[in-house]
Amino acid sequence: MTSIRIVAAISLASALALALAGCGSSSSSPSVGSGTSVVSTGGFQSPLTQSLTAGKRGGTLVVLNETEFEHLDPGIAYYNIDYEVVDVTQRALYSYKPNTTTEATPDMASGPPEIAADNRTITIHIREGIHFSPPVDREVTSEDVAYAIERGANPDVANAYFHSYFDSVEGGPKAEGGPIKGIQTPNKHTIVFHLTEPKAQIVADALVLPLSAAVPKEYAEKFDKNKPSNYADYQVATGPYMLKNNSEGKVLGVGYIPGKSATLVRNPNWNPKTDFRPAYLNEILIKIGGTTTVIGRQVLEGTDMVQNEAPNQASVRLAAEKFKSQLEISPGAGTHYIAVNNKVGPFSNIDLRKALWAALDRAAMDKARGGELVTNVMTHFLYPTIPGFEQAGGLAGPKVDYNEHPEGDMAIAEKYIRLAGYAKGKYSGGQTLEVVGSRSSPAEQDAEVVNQTLKNLGFTTKFTLVEPSTMYSKYCGVPKEEIDVCPSVGWIADFADPQTVLNITFNGKFINPVESNNWGQVDDPTINAAMTAAESVTGTSARATAWAKIDDELVADAAAIPFDWDKQANIEGSGVDGVGDLWDSGEWDYDYSSLK
Amino acid sequence: MSVGRLEALPPGGEGLEFLDLGGEIAARSPLQLFWMRFRQDRLALASFAFIVLLIVVAVAAPLVVEVLGLPGPNVQNLNLTDSFGSPLGPSLAHPFGVDQLGQDVMSRVIYGARVSLEVAIIGTGMASVIGVVIGMLAGFYPGWVDTLLSRTIDAFLSIPILLLGLGIGAACAVKGCVGGTIQPGLGVIIFLIAIATWPYMARLVRGLVLSLREHEFVDASRALGASDMRIMFREILPNLTAPIIVYASLQIPFNILFEATLSYLGVGIRPPTASWGQMIASATPIFNTAWWYMTFPGLALLFTVLAFNLLGDGLRDALSPRAA
């Protein structure tokens, strides 16, 4: 399997409780996710309280983006900055309304997935009357959905999560972009998935990801033959908006100028009767570049603009003090924890891991990340909005002594160091720890707190900060480097199923030679077996219970040292009525946001 | 300022009686002449005093921090940040404020001086020694030796040193390079400074030696049977002292900035060791809410570089023959 994304990147969220809903207004009260209600958002607006139907139509929203997009191809996009565009230009089979992480609404699909009793077959009907944007213009069929998913396995598309969720589809593991035996289209409005394992729920859940957004084969195939595919440069849309293009469908240089801007205009073929999105705005102009500090001030003092990425601490503080109505706080934006090497080195000893957990001043680390407004002290691994969070202990977490004191407790830490065989209560093993952190704020502050804590416990460290992507790709994600401590790794679920939080990061079968997301090389046979069993459990509640037990075992094993459940801040100008996506770390949703 | 021809004569020289100096005029040594000129340059004097103070503070950093009642440079105290995690500003207890980890900025600025001066003095010293030796050899031995060394100098001058520093910093960050021999940090910065700046010194020295080797005192030494090494290092080198000192003093601020640049870019000094460049980098994202964090290390860097530059100018003026 390939890796899932890392926190620096982004999120889609949530599992499906697909027994519901068609399109229409959002008058019901959706289930928002486990533990969401107990997370304080400081009295600021949040995706939990915003109105989805009170927007005013028209106008151009300016979006300021510090960084460049990674990929705008729906089959490749994996970062939340990309999702913000893909979400308004493409319609996946299912999608979430902004204020939920657990109720997926049929989008391209006309109803919930039909899962066979043996949990090995999924049948989905495609909505009629949806058309691709120019120059394709024709109606979307089930074959377009099949091709969209199949191309994810094309090495020149290289979707990041295809093998994580679609390997149980017959033919999935060996797929390379061509037709997949287990994906059938008996008619132009029906698609059927045949699985080799009873994992229908997780496959159905994964259909909220943009890989399931239709792609017209006869149009895209020639672009997909390029190495790598450049379909993104000529992409067509099914959503309310499209990247501005010319008559040949070319987007690159027209509606998307790398490093400079992206222009989203209305899709003339979008039929609002087939969609639940209000799509208030006429145009969305995304400007790329600048620095986050300057952008933050520009947005807060401006009118018709928003900051696309999470603002830095200084902007959050400024907003909280002077621009209160322009700040949104969203719970359930992921986790940060310390990955310690379970396989080799001092932290292969469980008692030393518990000692570090006990000694760590998690409250201080969270303060360094921006304080209570944007963090909660993390006490276990499933996070708010993910099913199983409450069963695993909620905010307080499991009652074990090394988890009791968020401010750190050296007495308990010394107890565990003695249990590890160091009679004086300080590590005296003589081995120098390799500590590799991320050179970006606030992760580097976290890293320095961890480094100091290790020294307080008697360890000698070799402390290095590198670029965030380098930390993951070259060191923490490469087992043979034998890094002892990665002080601040993060994770956001692909969707709100507990498997997407725990499996890739703590299951021994996902220790890959490179790009491993099991950074601590956690490989406990008992936990591995429990995860394998839980993968096939069906039903949101049953899955939550099964994975919460696994969470308990991970805490008992001190497999990693948790310190932060993120809440994400987002800021808008005074003239914007922004709506954030709870399922996407509170990122602005341009399908629902409007100008005042 | 002109000191007059007579002042340059040696004291009590035999055979000078015919000048009838009347016993009123005493000749001055070169050091006296230098001091007489240098002390009239108030800016250079003030810079010299600042640098001496800086060296004292850097050497005695632990004592200075203790006397001032400051916490150590790496003492973290998150209680000194507000509810948003923003550091608190200057106060009596923390005159320069604190950083995001509640570490005292003044304490770190004081310790940061150590890094800057180590880099400046050791790096410049190494570059000067290498440059002088290579330059003297190239200047003293025209022909293939000069050609070989001069081309070597050209080759080193073509190395994009900042990119090399960034490359080493990135490629060797964790495990080091060449079997762990090269590890980013102070040692590598000093090494980079040495290999980046010795060619300039070498070119300067080579040019001067090319001229000096034709002087009569060199012929005289050779006639007396002096070896090449003796001529180079005992006869010619003393005549190069002034330009070497001037050039080295002007190289020091460049090297301080080079270290600060690498640390700012994250490939210099490793945290938690305090470095001015690294502090400025960490302060950048929060400058609008914590002005002190960037300002004080920035000022320290500014004044230190300025002081070395002014001192270098003063030394040049005082040592330059044109001033006589």
Image (cartoon, grey):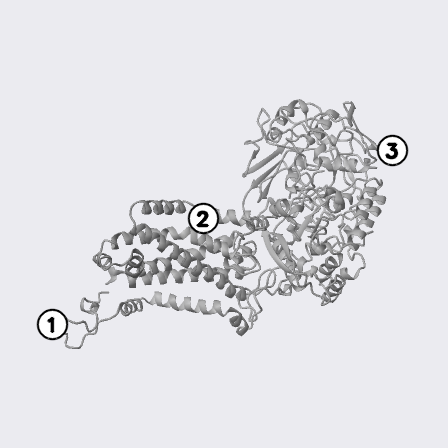
Relative to A560, say whether B95 is above or below. below
Which residue ends up furthest to the bottom in the rendered image?
Answer: B23
Secondary element under disc 3, as helix, strand or loop, is: loop
Q: Is residue B114 left or right of residue B34?
A: right
Which one is in front, A460 or A13? A460
Secondary element under disc 2, as helix, strand or loop, is: helix
Circle 2: residue type: Ile
Residue A495 location, quadrant: top right
Q: Is residue B114 left or right of residue A311?
A: left
Secondary element under disc 1, as helix, strand or loop, is: helix
Which one is in front, B313 or A288? B313
Q: On the image, numbered disc 2 is attached to which residue? A: B161
Q: Is residue B260 left or right of residue A526?
A: left
Which one is in front, A274 or A243? A243
Q: On the image, numbered disc 3 is attached to which residue? A: A118
Where does the image place residue A506, in percent across and percent down from the top left? Answer: 75, 47
Circle 3: residue type: Asp
Q: CA distance from mark 1 to mark 2?
A: 60 Å
Which residue ends up furthest to the left in the rendered image?
Answer: B18
Q: Is residue B180 left or right of residue A412?
A: left
Residue in the image at 64% along x and 59% along y: A449
Read off the chain for label 1.
B
Circle 1: residue type: Phe
Residue in the image at 37% along x and 60% along y: B249
* Label 1 Cα crowd, 10 Å radius (few <14 / some 14-19 / many 20+): few
Where does the image place residue B79, in percent across and percent down from the top left? Answer: 64, 65
Where does the image place residue B7, in percent across and percent down from the top left? Answer: 20, 69
Question: Is disc 2 on the same chain as disc 1?
Answer: yes
Relative to A244, say whether B154 is above or below. below
